[in-house]
Image (cartoon, rainbow, N blue to C red):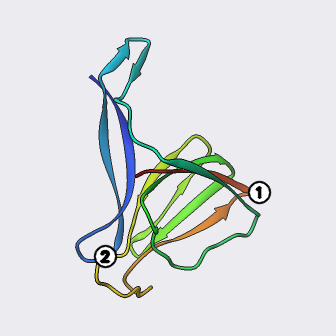
Amino acid sequence: MSTFTKVILFTDRDGRAKFRDEKIELAEGHPQAMLSRILPASGYQLRHSPVGFRSQWHCTPNPQWVFILGGEMEIGTHEGSRTFRPGEHFFSADVLPEGETFDERVHGHWSAQRGPHPLVTLFLKVP
């Protein structure tokens, strides 16, 4: 069976942001166009970030898919960083643990534009 790799940025039990991969089965469709089941979504948002953009440390307010449409996006965690290019994605679920007060020495991640082109992203919101 074919699968799609869902790259997930999540908050681990120690409160730190980490990446992991999860497989989504592509069990529908036909051999030339395998599909996953329909996944829920509630809206989307587009963002343009100029060359030189870098965010502060933060947590994702609500889980969402992030698709890179143009430019390059680097996501930094306390364990290192990962760069995403056009056509790549990740599922951002790095939320602040319930009952915690945000501490950038422990929680969250940062994002930055990389390369010579502005960063263009699509945020697909999920319920």
Figure disc tally: 2
Q: Amino acid at mark 2?
A: Pro
Q: Which mark is residue 108?
A: none
Please name whichever residue, 5 or 91, is drawn nearer the observer in this view of the structure: 91
Q: Amino acid at mark 1?
A: Pro
Label 2 environment density (alpha carbons within 10 Å; few <14, some 14–19, many ≥20): some
Quarter of the rendering containing residue 49: bottom right
Q: Is residue 11 above or below residue 98?
A: above
- Estimate the x, y position of residue 21 in percent, counting from the top left: 33, 49
> Residue placed at 57% from the left, 49% from the top?
44
Who comes first in sequence, dot 2 or dot 1?
Answer: 2
Q: Secondary structure under badge 2?
A: loop
Q: Which residue is mark 2?
A: 97
Quarter of the rendering containing residue 10: bottom left
Q: Secondary structure under badge 1?
A: loop
Q: Which residue is mark 1?
A: 116
Please name whichever residue, 124 or 4, is drawn nearer the observer in this view of the structure: 124
Label 1 environment density (alpha carbons within 10 Å; few <14, some 14–19, many ≥20): few
